Image (cartoon, rainbow, N blue to C red):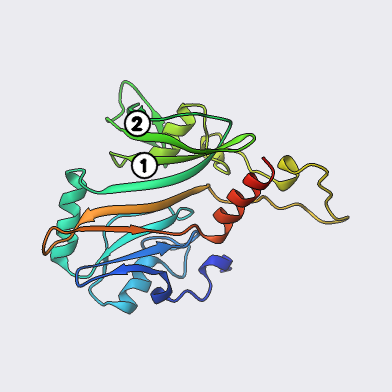
Amino acid sequence: MIMHKYAKNIRFEDLIIFENINYIIINKPPYVSTLEDRHDPINILKLAKTYHEDAQVCHRLDKETSGSLVIAKNFEAYRHFSIMLEKRQVKKIYHAVSHGLHQIENLEADQPLAIGANKSRVDYREGKSSLTMIATLENFRNHTLFKCFPVSGRLHQIRVHLAHHKAPIVSDPAYGGELIYLSQIKKRYNIKKFEEEQPLIPRVALHAESIVFRDLENEKEISASAPYPKDFEILIKQLRKHS
């Protein structure tokens, strides 16, 4: 099995962006599954248990999604986080790059979502209540960087809500997003002979930028921010440069 470059030689310690006696927060690399996956030789849970034997992943990020992921170091901390999730007391902020120019201040995307064939869809009849707060962070020439706060936690919620509002995420063909190439945004771009141009980012352009919740022991607020991985950073840099 061939591993993606992001999944090679991962040291769990290098992923940690916060740690105390109850929780570890990591910056999950893209292309690494959160839980066990028969198609993957490694996953975050497996790596976490080599660092702390009682580790339990508190929530999931899609395999392609990078960013902040919380891991509990004991059962009480895991249960505490689960209760906060149920009560919608965990604030997760995602950054997404979408097609088109959109100037949105505080959109409440509340279309109900239903799941079918490993995908979600807007369904006003059978769908479950869902809410994503969406705001524009930055406009480029033909793309937009969004800040998204999913209040509920439905499958692919941000991806579906953005697509519904005519802003599909870059490199997300499942919901109408297309690959983006440097030749599309850079004037007088010349590709070398016999060379095939690669997309600026081949995965869904979605990053879990930060997370905020309250600790088990003293209810003190825990907040952590996850820097962009290299591919997301390069995408933003090129969009800014050629706007």
Q: Which residue is drawn at 63% across and 45% down?
A: 239
Q: Residue at x 69, y 43 (%)?
A: 242
Q: Residue at x 67, y 50 (%)?
A: 199
171 and 228: which one is in front?
228
Q: Which residue is drawn at 35% across and 34% down?
A: 133
What secondary structure is found at the residue carrying circle 1?
loop
Q: In this view, does 175 lie above or below 165?
A: below
The reply to whether the C-beta atoms of the residues labelled 1 and 2 are less than 8 Å apart is: yes
Judge left or right: residue 82 versus residue 111: left
What secondary structure is found at the residue carrying circle 2?
strand
Q: In this view, does 161 lie above or below 186?
A: above
**Residue 50 screen position, x and y as percent:** 33, 78
| Amino acid carrying mark 2 in the image | Leu
Rendering quarter of residue 147: top left
**Residue 97 screen position, x and y as percent:** 53, 42
Judge left or right: residue 160 versus residue 205: left
Which residue in the protein does label 2 denote?
113
